[in-house]
Amino acid sequence: MNALIVDMALGCSTNSMLHLPAISHKCGVELNTDIANGISAVTPNLFHLTPAGHTYMEDLNKAGDVYAVMDTSLRLLQITISAVL
């Protein structure tokens, strides 16, 4: 869910809702549009990246990159889970 939260904060993409449910399914985690809509309802849109928005990756980089988005979204992220590297 953390990936979806960060993606939502970046403006999300229709590709996200194609790929993330498939990845989640392979991992045995349910992710559907109802869950995504619930996450969307509580996740602030911090950057509305192109092509749908008016900001570019360069703008995100100048503002602190994905780490800044994660820091701002910290209250929503599940930080007690282990990361897969």
Image (spheres, rainbow, N blue to C red):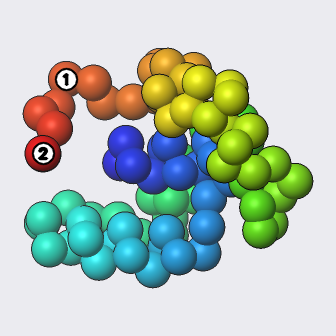
Q: Can you see residue 42? A: no
Residue at figure coordinates x 66%, y 38% from the top left: 60
Residue at figure coordinates x 87%, y 53% from the top left: 54
In the displayed image of the protein, which residue is found farthest to the right? 54
Q: Which residue is mark 2?
A: 85
- Three-letter code for the amino acid on which mark 2 is drawn: Leu
- Residue 78, x across and y down, in percent: 31, 30
The quadrant holding residue 62 is top right
- Crowd rating for badge 1 (residues with CA inside 10 Å; few <14, some 14–19, many 20+): few
**Which numbered disc flags the more N-terminal residue, 1 or 2?**
1
- Residue 10, x across and y down, in percent: 63, 47
Q: How many marks?
A: 2
Q: Which residue is mark 1?
A: 80
* Foreground of the two, 5 or 29: 5
Q: Is residue 55 left or right of residue 41?
A: right
Residue at figure coordinates x 39%, y 49% from the top left: 3
Q: Judging from the image, what secondary structure is the residue with disc 1 in?
A: loop
The quadrant holding residue 35 is bottom left
